Amino acid sequence: MKIPQELKREELPLADALHRIGLSSSVSRSDVDMLIARLPDVLKSAPAFLCVLDDQWRYEFGAPYTVQTSQVLGTDQCPEVRILLHGLLKVLRHARGDDLDKYLSRLSDQSKHFDHLAELAPVLRAKELNRLRYEPRPGGENSPGPDWAMGFMDGASGLVEVKSRIKELLDLFSSLRSGTDPSPHATRMPVLPGLLKDVSRKFPIKAETTNSFQGVWVYSPVWFILEELQQVFDRCDSSRVSFLVVERAWREHEALTVDDESRCVLSKYFSLPGV
């Protein structure tokens, strides 16, 4: 499935579009060159285009979602080049080479590209980052772990697990078309079944210190019913998970925390206006 040509004002290879966005946002050409040199060939050669609908540079990569017998293509399947650029630059600056290579390898999997791109959400919002580890194993190599271990300039550290639920939401939208509840006119959607399933086991029991934090970041194109979201969060093990952030379409967010102290920690280390 291809983007209709009438939606493209201009077209470039992704590598050139990365330079275009870098130039407009005061990123040095050498930094962009360094990033492009690390990108897998299949990703750097992806087509990019200036979208007529929102005047944003987007790129075509990844397999369209299939809902029932139909393929679905939209802005979430044509991500913004700026998200990829600024997110990967932070990973490039703060992650070890093997962690960067591991993440880029995941990102180049077209069947999972959108899920792994969503993992950049907390990285983009992190303030005063000092180091990043991708897919650490705090409980040992044979135990599950979160997506990111983060270190900050003041010595604080955090563990963050990221969930992307676009495919499940499309399945829910499909059920709406068949006439089932909830109302398609609602401004918020019901919380997806299994939204935070098994996330607690990704984290060790949290040490009693204000210098560390552990939580979950969910990328979603829609808002969830807040009361349901709170109920799901309350069922998490609070000794392991202290916050939940829902990131909506890269631009808006909502945050739930176990207490005021966790909310203060979240607002200190992430750019989350209003938290």
Image (cartoon, grey):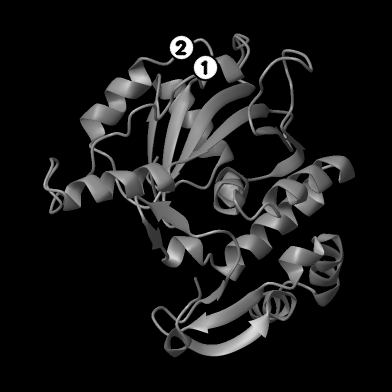
Disc 1 is placed on an element classified as helix
Q: Which residue is mark 2?
A: 237
Residue type for callout 2: Asp
Q: In this view of the protein, which residue sits in the foreground, 116 or 92?
A: 116
Tag 1–tag 2 contact (CB < 8 Å): yes
**Residue at 66% over, 84% down:** 12
In the rendered structure, the answer to whether residue 97 lies left or right of residue 8 reads: right
Query: Which label was assigned to residue 200?
Result: 1
* Residue 59: percent from left, percent from top: 59, 71
- How far apart are the alpha carbons under marks 1 and 2? 6 Å
Q: In this rendering, is residue 235 above or below 149?
A: above
**Residue at 69% over, 75% down:** 14
In the rendered structure, the answer to whether residue 237 lies left or right of residue 191 reads: right
Disc 2 is placed on an element classified as loop
Residue type for callout 1: Ser
In the rendered structure, the answer to whether residue 119 lies left or right of residue 173 reads: right
* Residue 109: percent from left, percent from top: 68, 51
Q: In this view of the protein, which residue sits in the foreground, 122 or 101?
A: 101
In the rendered structure, the answer to whether residue 37 lies left or right of residue 112 reads: right
Q: In this rendering, is residue 197 above or below 164?
A: above
